[in-house]
Image (cartoon, coloured by chain):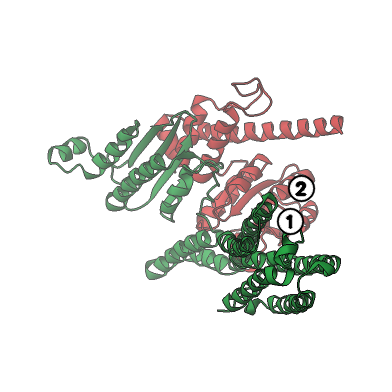
Amino acid sequence: MSALRVMVVDDHPMWREGVARDLTEAGFLVVATSGEGRQAIRVAAAARPDVVVLDLQLPDISGVEVVLGLRAALPEVRVLMLSASGEEQSVLDAVKAGATGYLVKSTAPAEFLDAVRRTAAGDPVFTPGLAGLVLGEYRRLAAPGQGPGPAGGAEPGTPRLTDRETEVLRLVAKGMSYKQIAQRLGLSHRTVQNHVQNTLGKLQLHNRVELTRYAIERGLGG
Amino acid sequence: MPSPPRGFEVPLWRALTVFRLASLAYVCVLAVRDADRYAHPFAVGALLLLMIAWTGATIVAYARPAWRRWPLLLADLGVVIAIVLSTPWVVGREALGNGVPTLGVAWMAGPVLAWAVSGGRRRGTVAALLVAGADLATRERIGQSSFTGVILMLLAGVVVGHVARLAVAAEERLQRAVELEAATRERERLARGIHDSVLQVLALVQRRGADLPGEAGDLARLAGEQEAALRALISGTTPVGAGRLDDGDAVDLRALLSRYASTAVSLSAPASPVPLPRQVAGELAAATSAALDNVGRHAGGRAWVLIEDEGDSVTVSIRDEGPGIPDGRLAEAAAQGRLGVTLSIQGRVADLGGTVRIMSAPEAGTEIELVVPRARG
C-alpha cells in the first residue's frame, strides 16, 4: 500500500512545518502545505491529497468555505480539522459541510497521527467536544419552532438519532473510547464506529438538502 | 482640571449670542419708535449705549469656556437687573402707564439663558425668578401680559437648562462609547497578535513535550494550561465562547462551567447557549465543581463534563476514569457521617427539583449525572 497523501493547511508557518515533519517521519507523504484557504483549494486540486489537515482559522476565507471548496474540487478528499478551543460554531458548521474529523491543537502527536490514519480510512474522528456539539445540533433541529414546519413540531425530514445512536454519542461526549463503549453496550467495535459515522452522515445529508433547497428558493424567488 | 471640549454645548452658546444680538436690535427699534415719549430720552440713549456695550462684552466673554464662571454670570445678571430697575426713572412712570414698554423686554432674558446653559434647570429657574422679580417691581400695574412675560422667561430658563444637561450627558455617553470602542479594538489587535504567535508556540511546546518523561513533560503540561488560560483571556469570554443572552436573569450554563475546563477536564456542550435562571445555573455549577473536586482527590484528575439541553430539562454529566467507588462504599461513608461530596451535590440538585444519578464500579470510573428541570414560563 502506497503512503497516504496528506496536505497541511495552517496559517502559522512554525506549526505547519512541525506537523508536516511529524507526518513525514511517521511515513506519510506530505504532498502540499498552505497558509491560506483559497490557495489551499487550488493546490489541493493538483496535489490530490487523501487527507487535508485543516486549521479553521485562516486569514482569507472561513473554515466552512475551505471545506466546501475542497470537497467541490476533490469529492473524495477527507478533512481533519485541527483547531483551537473556543470555535464551537465553526467546528460544527465545518462538520456539517463535510469535514469528518476534529482534534484540538494540543493533542499529542501519536494520537494525531492515528487520527490522520482513521480519517483516511473513512472513520470519523470525534473528540468528546465534537460529540457534544453534534448532540446539541440534533436536539436543536428536533426542537419545536425550527424551520417552516407545522407549529409545535419539527418539520418532516429533520434528521433524528435512534436511541442507540444517542446512547453511543453521549458516551463519546463523556470521553469514552470506541472500545470502552463497545464493551459497555455489548457491541462490536465496528458497530460503534458505524453508529458514530451515521450520526455525521445524516447531519451532512440534511445540510446538503437544506443548502439545495435554499438555492432553489433563492433561484425561483429572485 | 482641564475640562474636556464640550462639543454639544458649543451650539447652545452660539445660539445665545444670536439671541442677545436679535433682542438688542428689538430693544433699539422700540427705543427709536418711542423716543419722544420717554421722560429722559438722553438717559435712555446712554442706557442703550451701555446695553450695546454690555452685549458686546458678554459675547466676547462667554466665547471663552474658562470665563463662563460665577463672576461673569453674576456680573451679567447684576447689570441686566440694574438696567431693568432704572426703567421707571428713565422711561417715566407716566409713559409706562400709557403702555410704553420697559427697556429690558426680551433682552433681559439673556443672562437667564446663560445661567441655564451653564448650570442646568435649577440655575435657569433662579435667574429667571430674579430677573422677573426686578421686572415686576418696575411695573405700575401688574397685568396679564406682564405675567405672561414672566412665565415665558421661567419656561425658557427651565427648558434651555434641561436641554443643556441633556447635551452634556449625551456628550459624556458618547465619550465613554468612544473609549470602549478604542479599548475593544486594542484588545482585538492584541488578540490577533497573541493568537498568531504565543498561543501557537505554547500549543507546540505542549504537543512536542507531552510524551516526554519527567520535568519536560510537566513543563509541556504547564504550557498547555497557560495556552488555555491565555486563549480564554484574549477571547474576552470563556473558552467556550459564552453566548450572549438578552434576558437579564438568565445565564449561559456553558459559560459558568467553562471555567472548570482545562487540559485535564474536557467540556462538551452544544454550540448554542444553554440558558438557565442565574440561581439554578449557579447551583448546578457548584454541584459540578464539587463532583470535579472529588475527581481531583480520588481519580487522578482526568475528567469529562457533558452539558445537554433537552428543552424541558438540562443534564450535566461528569465522568472520570478513577478507581471508582467500591460497592457499599457510599453506604459506608454515609454510615460514618462522611458524605461530604455526595450530600452536597444531592442537596443542591434536589433543591432545584432535580435528580442525581451516580454510577460507579471498581476500576471503571465514576459517572455522576445531574438532571435539572427547566421551569417553563
| Visible residue check, residue B184 | no
**Horizontal and vertical percent for residue B314?**
44, 34
Q: Name the mark on residue A194.
A: none
Q: Residue A69 carries which label?
A: 2
Taking A122 as reference, is B179 above or below it? Answer: below
**Residue drawn at x 61%, y 36% as measured from the top left:** A200
Q: Which amino acid does label 1 sit on?
A: Gly
* B361 or B71, nearer to the observer: B71
Left or right of B149: which side holds A140? left
How many residues crowd around disc 2 within 10 Å: few (fewer than 14), some, or many (20 or more)? many
Please report, as a chain letter, where disc 1 is located. A
Which residue is denoted by mark 1 in the rendering?
Answer: A37
Q: In this view, does B152 lie above or below A172?
A: below
| Sequence-first disc among 2 and 1 | 1
Where's the C terminus of chain A, which quadrant? top right
> Tags 2 and 1 in contact by the CB under 8 Å rule?
yes
Residue located farthest toward the front when viewing the structure as drawn? B94
Residue B172 vs residue A206, the one in the foreground: B172
